[in-house]
Amino acid sequence: MGKKILSREEILHLAGLAKLHLSDEEINKYQGQLDETINYIKNLEELDTSKVVPTNSVVDLKNVTFEDGAENKKGLTVGESLSNTKETEKNEFAVKRIM
């Protein structure tokens, strides 16, 4: 592996923040793993993203809530919802007690 990015002291500082007590072997192991991760991120920084449209989500969700007073035409009635269940109680699903 190439030049160390994080020093031993920085690894110990991170371990302290996480309240971890690391052996010398673990310090070396995590130093290598964190260096690899940082190098990977540096590679990602080199990608040309100038033509990528900024987004805050990878899922193409539109407004999934209803306006007040709007009719839910996609929803099921209580009867439709309960039609395939084995047991009901007071127009609700009946399930086995878990506690």
Image (cartoon, grey):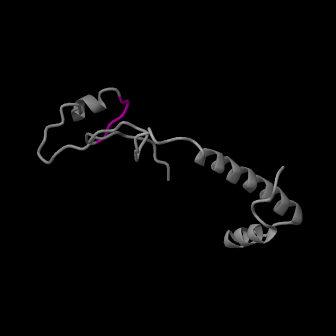
Q: Main secondary structure of the magenta part?
A: loop
Classify residue 81 as left or right of residue 54.
Answer: left
| Towards the viewer: 57 or 35 | 35
Report whether 5 appears left or right of 66: right
Residue 38 position, x and y percent, is 68, 54
Q: Looking at the image, which residue sits at the far left?
A: 69
Q: Nearer the viewer, residue 96 or 71?
A: 71
Q: Position of residue 86 (x, y in %)?
A: 38, 30
Rendering quarter of residue 44: top right
Q: Is residue 12 left or right of residue 42?
A: right
Q: Position of residue 70 (x, y in %)?
A: 13, 41
Q: Image quarter for residue 20?
A: bottom right
Q: Quadrant of residue 16?
A: bottom right
From what the image shows, is residue 59 above or below residue 40? above
Q: Is 50 left or right of 85, judged from the image as shown?
A: right
Residue 7 part of the magenta segment: no
Q: Residue furthest right?
A: 25
Of 53 and 33, the residue lying toward us: 53
Seen at 36% across and 30% down, the residue is 85
Q: What count of labels does the image hold? A: 0
**Residue 81 sits above or below residue 13 on the image:** above
Residue range of the region highlighted in magenta in the rendering: 85-89
- Residue name at image x 18 percent, y 31 percent: 73
Residue 68 placement (x, y as % from top left): 14, 48
